[in-house]
Image: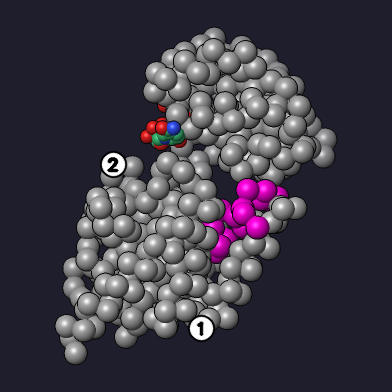
């Protein structure tokens, strides 16, 4: 039986692993399999991110995969064990908990940290794969201030709070920002809408969707189609950022732990990283629809490991 299983190997999961390993909890990390249903690489969203410039301690920036490799090394240096498996099912109705991996192997654990992250939704216009990370990104806060986007016209797709927030962020360094929204009314909260509509650098392109991405080596323009009359137009932009929502990776937890209507794990108010099931903790984007940053995920991973350590001490003391 394991004392602690950490599910997920992004910044939250691996920071939890560093803390838990140094606390001698001997954690096992299910880091995700290469052949998972989501088609994603273990290591989380940073594995498909190039320059990361907002992680403290890297004044020159760091490549996403390099950063994850450093975290992984740091966790294993202190004795965390990692297996390339996905959790496909868990039974939290009994204790020790049961975690079933995608290869069918079942493991028992006294405590769990869920750090499976979320994935950004992207639409799939023509040329998307070709320009992904060559002008196209799903995180304006992460990538928008990179030199390749500075003083250039950029586009952000979406009409929610994220799109408004991120349009404001982009407007600080871009020459112009187009918010492309599929309807003629924004979903975002009034205050964020007002801020965007008052920003002279931002123009909302109402009732349009992105139909194709065009350019040479890098993105140069987007082809748009009107959702009102089907007419078409092109916008010259050096960057396109999706802000059309996220999907938390929690399908394997269905019915086992409290989640909100979008599937994000709900943390117990005033109890750090605790979930509705005592002994099960959550960290990172899987329980955070607000910040979604490397450092906030890592911070939550640290907190989850400290919470798990305390919880294990109580349980193991009462079992002794
Ligand atoms: P969201 O509220 O779900 O908005 C997604 C937007 O993307 C909507 O405007 C939607 O259009 C559009 N969209 C969805 N699929 C699309 C597609 N295939 N093609 C084109 N457009 C598409 O997501 P979010 O903005 O990421 O916000 C998520 C949650 O985080 C919300 O609860 C939000 O309040 C919160 N949040 C808060 C803050 C803040 O308070 N500062 C900042 C960020 C996020 P429709 O409107 O037509 O459906």
Give me the C-alpha separation between circle 1 and circle 2: 37 Å
Which residue of the protein is positioned furthest toward the right in this rendering? 216
Residue 48 is inside the magenta segment: yes
Residue neighbourhood size for the residue with mark 2, other residues' Cα within 10 Å, grouped as few (<14), some (14–19), many (≥20) = few
Q: Which residue is mark 2?
A: 261
Residue neighbourhood size for the residue with mark 1, other residues' Cα within 10 Å, grouped as few (<14), some (14–19), many (≥20) = some
Depth order, front residue of 32/25: 25
Please tell me which of labels 1 and 2 falls first in the chain.
Answer: 1
Give left or right: position of 246 versus 273: right
x and y percent of residue 97 in the render? 26, 74
x and y percent of residue 36 in the render? 50, 62
Q: Which residue is mark 1?
A: 79
Q: Residue 308: in sight, yes or no?
A: yes
Is residue 121 shown above or below 32?
Answer: above
Quick one: SS at disc 2? loop
On residue 124, which mark appears? Answer: none
Q: Which residues are magenta?
A: 41-57
Give left or right: position of 206 versus 224: left
Is residue 78 shown above or below 32?
Answer: below
């Amino acid at each position: 039986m394991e004392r602690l299983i950490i599910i997920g190997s992004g910044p939250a999961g691996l920071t939890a692993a560093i803390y838990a390993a140094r606390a001698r909890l001997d954690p096992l990390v299910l880091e995700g399999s290469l052949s998972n249903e989501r088609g994603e690489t273990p290591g989380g969203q940073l594995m498909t991110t190039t320059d990361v410039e907002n992680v403290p301690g890297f004044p020159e920036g760091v490549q996403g995969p390099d950063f994850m490799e450093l975290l992984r090394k740091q966790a294993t240096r202190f004795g965390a064990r990692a297996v390339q498996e996905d959790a496909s099912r868990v039974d939290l109705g009994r204790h020790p908990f049961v975690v079933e991996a995608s290869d069918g192997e079942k493991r028992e654990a006294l405590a769990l940290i869920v750090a499976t992250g979320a994935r950004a939704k992207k639409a799939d216009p023509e040329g998307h794969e070709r320009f992904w990370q060559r002008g196209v990104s799903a995180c304006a806060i992460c990538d928008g201030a990179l030199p390749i986007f500075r003083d250039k016209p950029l586009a952000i797709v979406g009409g929610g709070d994220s799109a408004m927030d991120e349009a404001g962020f982009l407007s600080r360094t871009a020459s112009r920002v187009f918010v492309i929204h599929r309807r003629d009314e924004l979903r975002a909260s009034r205050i964020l809408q007002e801020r965007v509509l008052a920003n002279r650098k931002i123009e909302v392109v109402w009732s349009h969707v992105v139909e194709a991405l065009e350019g040479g080596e890098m993105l140069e323009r987007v082809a748009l189609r009107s959702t009102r009359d089907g007419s078409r137009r092109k916008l010259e932009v050096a960057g396109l950022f999706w802000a059309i929502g996220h999907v938390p990776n929690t399908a394997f937890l269905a019915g086992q732990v409290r989640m909100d209507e979008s599937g994000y794990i709900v943390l117990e108010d005033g109890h750090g990283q605790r979930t509705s099931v005592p002994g099960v903790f959550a960290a990172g984007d899987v329980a955070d629809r607000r910040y979604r940053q490397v450092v906030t995920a890592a911070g939550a991973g640290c907190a989850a490991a400290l919470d798990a350590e305390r919880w294990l001490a109580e349980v193991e003391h009462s079992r002794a």
